[in-house]
Amino acid sequence: MIAPAAHEAPTGFAIRRIVVAADSSAQGQAVLEAAANLGARLHAEVEGVFVEDIDLVNLAALPLGREVHLISGVARALDTDTLEIQFRAEASQARRALKLLTDRARVTSSFRVVRGRVDAEIMMAAGGGDLLVIGIYSRAVGPRSRPGSMALAAARAGPRSVLLLRAGARVTGRVLVAFDGSEGAKKALDAGARLTGDTVDGLSVLLTADTPSRADELQAQVRAALSPWSISPKFLRTPRLDLDDMCRLSHDAGAEILVLDAGHPVLADDAHGRLLEQISCPVLLVR
């Protein structure tokens, strides 16, 4: 299947540069792999950004600075020399991993190291691309994993579309797009079609309509929008949709990527954190 050229997309969802937050964690590896795979699928270049956390630098400069190993729980003195060595080692590992993955995918890539507050630096870097790829969780551990501050910031008010995922997640399976006929939903549908790629039956579309006639109208809109692709979507219908419905229906549909307009009503009242806690698959928020 040959997808339309980027300039032919009426909604303007064209991805030419993917920015990925790079680190050496297990989740970071999954994020790099997803970015490389998407770069190949969307014919986009990938830029890895590793942030040397200025807050850690400032902590290391204090005489009582300590670091705690995430696995053993053992605390030890944190000094600037040790921290600089750790930064270089992690950045080098992430750089090599990205190069290996993008070379394998035949994708052009670059890598840079910056120093500053992690969330702010990643958001700034995202502004220079078309899509940000990050992990849902921070590297902190505790009795319950919660979305990290960077994921929440990108979901709530990121400058570009953002793909949020966890370790082990794939971005090559069935795509589910929430569609209500809005302009944002149309852009999300275009994004879902591009992610579906050559998988003819790999797209499901969740229609929100309060009457059967409105659902029929939305279904006709989807079919018309997908006419340039050889895609046979599966349709799901619901008269109403809240966040719990969204997560349940995504799971029931076997979705491996949920594509959602970043302005979708289910995200009203700052529900982004609840979505990232409850959803069982990666989420692409389209802007």
Image: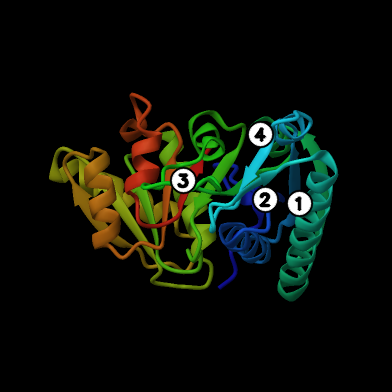
Which residue matches tag 4? 123
Q: CA distance from mark 3 to mark 2?
A: 20 Å
Determine crowd level at label 1: few under 14, some 14-19, many 20+ residues with C-alpha closer than 10 A.
Answer: many
Disc 2 residue type (three-letter): Val
Label 2: element kind: strand
Q: Quadrant of residue 96?
A: bottom right
Label 1: element kind: strand
Disc 4 residue type (three-letter): Met
Horizontal side of 201 relative to 82 (left or right) equals left
The quadrant of the rendering that contains the N terminus is: bottom right
Disc 3 residue type (three-letter): Ala
Callout 1 touching callout 4 (CB < 8 Å) = no
Q: Nearer the viewer, residue 187 or 82?
A: 82
Residue 188 shows which numbered tag?
Answer: 3
The quadrant of the rendering that contains the C terminus is: top right
Q: CA distance from mark 1 to mark 2?
A: 6 Å
Residue located at (54% from left, 42% from top): 11
Name the N-terminal-most of marks 1 and 2: 2
Name the N-terminal-most of marks 4 and 3: 4
Residue located at (18% from left, 47% from top): 238
Which residue matches tag 2? 20
Instruction: Return the x and y of residue 18 as percentages of the image width and height.
Output: 69, 50
Label 4: element kind: helix
Instruction: Return the x and y of residue 217 as percentages of the image width and height.
Output: 26, 45
Name the N-terminal-most of marks 3 and 2: 2
Disc 1 residue type (three-letter): Glu
Name the N-terminal-most of marks 1 and 3: 1
Instruction: Return the x and y of residue 94 as percentages of the image width and height.
Output: 74, 59
